Image (cartoon, coloured by chain):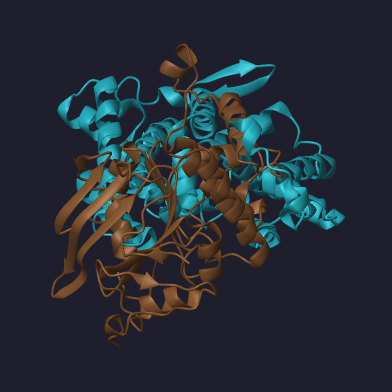
């Protein structure tokens, strides 16, 4: 059959190949490269900033300081995993930090109040995270509200639920059940102290990097964010994919809640206040498009590291904390501008 | 020269069993009657064009055939057996693939990813069954041979993102996807509506290579020259009914448009005379409008 369909091109009256022979300018080549590897530009920024801060201050590249940066990045970095999944579907989750804190309170308080064993309390917390994600998912898929509005509402709801449930009380240190603070423990590799929480974060990244790249579900997440209607016509159950993304993200936020307990060695209803927007910052700086369908999970890790390196480096340089915030703001604008530039090249 | 009747039959002398047949399809939306008892027959290996004015019911008819809508009454037969499609996935599982005018591809996925979108193939062994890992290399290889067999030789790199392709090439990917997985029928809904002249020619060439493979095609189009170039028979839809089925060899474009708009009426069983020049000399009794 194939031999008969290899039709001669000569009499067709046009040369379809000519479209491919168009020459590209160097700027277009860079655009194409950045387009194919969205994590490339943040990776370059990270490498340059590490080099610059190392030159500016000799204390920057010490094992202790690098260890500190990884610990500071762990919570926002882990939170950004779930956030990346949602942003890839062209959504956004403003409630991620609130779900994280709520789950961490559930873990600590069920163990403290009712004597639930630590591992079971952690499972309960993960379940609450899944339910919270499912609530967001149902509002997005069934009530068909925009994710921004849904999570703006649930942000307030989860914050309020956390405060009501915790009754303003922080559960700290010795009050934490066994296992709850486990992700705050450290071990040493080549003089760098690493917390188990950082390891869990890296495992989260490794798992979802694999899932997004090599499984059908991962491709469907991209396809839904790319063009939901095209995905539906291709036979993908769009609402089901969206629902699974929100539930998965909820579980990942709860897992981050466990890391949070280890990081601050306490479960407090007032911790992680900035985490909602910081996770979005990490994802955006990491090269994932807010319009969905484009980006990588590794980019979000790099994005979180860039923010951590900037904050740490500017502190060591003796600059006021306001300048750190200023620098992060500029980074966001630059990152989104680069994304727009890359997208324009394709239109 | 020859006479064409309302029931233009396919090239063979004896009409074989239709692959896809719609019998007396009625579709109403509230008080609006979109389809008022439509019949349609698609025979093996033919390109059947469906033309009609806006509101004539061609989109609704196609939606019923592709599973996007369910007919209110009437029957759809596939190879002579009644079928009921509730979703496009149902129709697809029966071997009916549809290509839409809206370039329904995921721009940031590559060509192979789009070809296999929604039916990805997993690796064999534990990597596939436990880790659910996809067989990227295998899908790219199959995508490549599929594209080559359809004569889309210009697309070499199956790892190329679809958004880097032209509109015609994107539509070629969508048509290739349909051709790769269709076992019975391919429905093309205005496949060239969003395309330029050169790109349309690419898609028309594709339609011809699909016919050479023996797959029947239903082509919905507004573009008369394109319809007359590729169609074997033309189903003319008017006011929710089938006004006529004609052969592009025996009817002129202007006559087809006249039937479509109601200026020329074809009475069932009565023959429309078409003379050597292709201009019509119709029985006056048939001309009612």
Chain with cyan colouring: A
Q: Would residue B72 be found to the left or right of residue B146 on screen?
A: left
In the displayed structure image, the side of residue A92 where residue A298 appears, left or right: right
Q: Which chain is brown?
A: B
Q: Quadrant of the N terminus of chain A?
A: top right
Classify the position of the C terminus of chain A by image quarter: bottom right
- Work out whether residue B244 or residue B187 is closer to the camera in this orientation and state it: B244
Q: x, y (%) of residue B27? A: 19, 64
Residue A25 quadrant: bottom right
Report whether A24 appears left or right of B75.
right
Specify the quadrant of the image occupied by residue A153: bottom left
* Residue A46 placement (x, y as % from top left): 72, 43
x then y, percent, for residue B75? 18, 51
What residue appears at the point 76 percent right and 55 percent down from the top-left corner?
A19
Q: Nearer the viewer, residue A233 or B22?
A: B22
Which residue is nearer to you in this view: A192 or B50?
B50
Visible residue check, residue B201: yes
């Amino acid at each position: 059959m194939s031999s008969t369909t290899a039709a001669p091109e000569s009499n067709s009256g046009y040369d379809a190949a000519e479209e491919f022979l168009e020459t590209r300018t160097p700027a277009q080549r860079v655009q194409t490269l950045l387009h194919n590897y969205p994590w490339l530009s943040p990776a370059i920024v990270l490498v340059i900033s590490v080099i610059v801060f190392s030159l500016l201050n000799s204390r920057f590249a010490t094992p202790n300081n690098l260890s500190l940066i990884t610990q500071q990045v762990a919570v926002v970095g882990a939170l950004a995993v779930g956030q990346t999944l949602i942003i890839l579907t062209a959504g956004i989750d403003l409630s991620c930090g609130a779900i994280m804190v709520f789950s961490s309170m559930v873990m600590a308080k069920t163990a403290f109040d009712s004597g639930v064993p630590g591992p079971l309390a952690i499972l309960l917390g993960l379940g609450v995270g899944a339910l919270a994600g499912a609530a967001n998912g149902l509002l997005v898929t069934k009530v068909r509200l925009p994710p921004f509005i849904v999570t703006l509402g649930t942000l307030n709801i989860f914050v309020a639920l956390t405060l009501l449930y915790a009754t303003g009380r922080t559960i700290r240190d010795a009050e934490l059940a066994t296992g709850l603070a486990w992700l705050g423990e450290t071990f040493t590799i080549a003089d760098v102290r690493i917390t188990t929480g950082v390891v869990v974060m890296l495992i989260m990244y490794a798992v979802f990097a694999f899932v997004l790249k090599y499984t059908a579900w991962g491709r469907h997440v991209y396809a839904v964010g790319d063009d939901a209607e095209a995905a539906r016509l291709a036979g993908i159950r769009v609402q089901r994919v969206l629902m699974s993304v929100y539930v998965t993200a909820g579980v990942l936020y709860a897992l981050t809640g466990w890391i949070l307990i280890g990081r601050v060695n306490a479960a407090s209803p007032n911790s992680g206040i900035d985490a909602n927007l910081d996770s979005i910052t990490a994802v955006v700086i990491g090269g994932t498009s807010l319009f969905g369908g484009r980006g990588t999970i590794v980019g979000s890790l790099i994005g979180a590291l860039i923010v951590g390196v900037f904050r740490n480096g500017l502190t060591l340089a003796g600059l006021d904390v306001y300048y750190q915030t200023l620098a992060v703001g500029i980074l966001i604008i630059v990152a989104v501008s680069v994304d727009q530039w890359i997208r324009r090249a394709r239109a | 020269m020859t006479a064409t009747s309302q029931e233009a039959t396919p090239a063979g002398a004896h009409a074989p069993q239709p692959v896809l047949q719609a019998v007396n399809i009625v579709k109403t939306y509230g008080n609006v009657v979109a389809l008022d008892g439509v019949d349609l027959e698609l025979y093996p290996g033919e390109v059947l064009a469906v033309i009609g004015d806006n509101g004539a019911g061609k989109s609704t008819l196609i939606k019923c055939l592709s599973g996007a809508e369910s007919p209110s009454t009437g029957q759809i037969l596939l190879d002579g057996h009644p079928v009921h499609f509730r979703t496009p996935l149902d129709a697809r599982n029966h071997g009916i693939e549809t290509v839409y005018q809206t370039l329904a591809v995921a721009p940031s996925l590559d060509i192979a990813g789009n070809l296999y979108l929604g039916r990805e193939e997993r690796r064999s062994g534990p990597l596939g069954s436990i880790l659910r890992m996809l067989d990227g290399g295998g899908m790219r290889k199959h995508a490549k041979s599929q594209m080559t067999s359809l004569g889309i030789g210009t697309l070499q790199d199956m790892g190329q993102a679809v958004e880097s392709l032209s509109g015609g090439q994107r539509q070629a990917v969508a048509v290739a996807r349909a051709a790769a997985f269709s076992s019975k029928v391919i429905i093309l809904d205005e496949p060239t509506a969003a395309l330029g002249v050169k790109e349309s020619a690419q898609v028309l060439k594709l339609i011809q290579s699909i016919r050479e493979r023996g797959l029947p095609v239903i082509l919905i189009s507004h573009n008369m020259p394109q319809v007359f170039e590729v169609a074997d028979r033309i189903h003319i839809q008017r006011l929710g009914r089938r006004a006529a089925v004609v052969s592009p060899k025996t009817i002129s474009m202007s006559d087809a448009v006249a039937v479509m708009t109601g200026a020329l009426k074809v009475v069932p069983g009565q023959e429309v005379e078409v003379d050597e020049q292709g201009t019509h000399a119709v029985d006056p009794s048939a001309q009612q409008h």
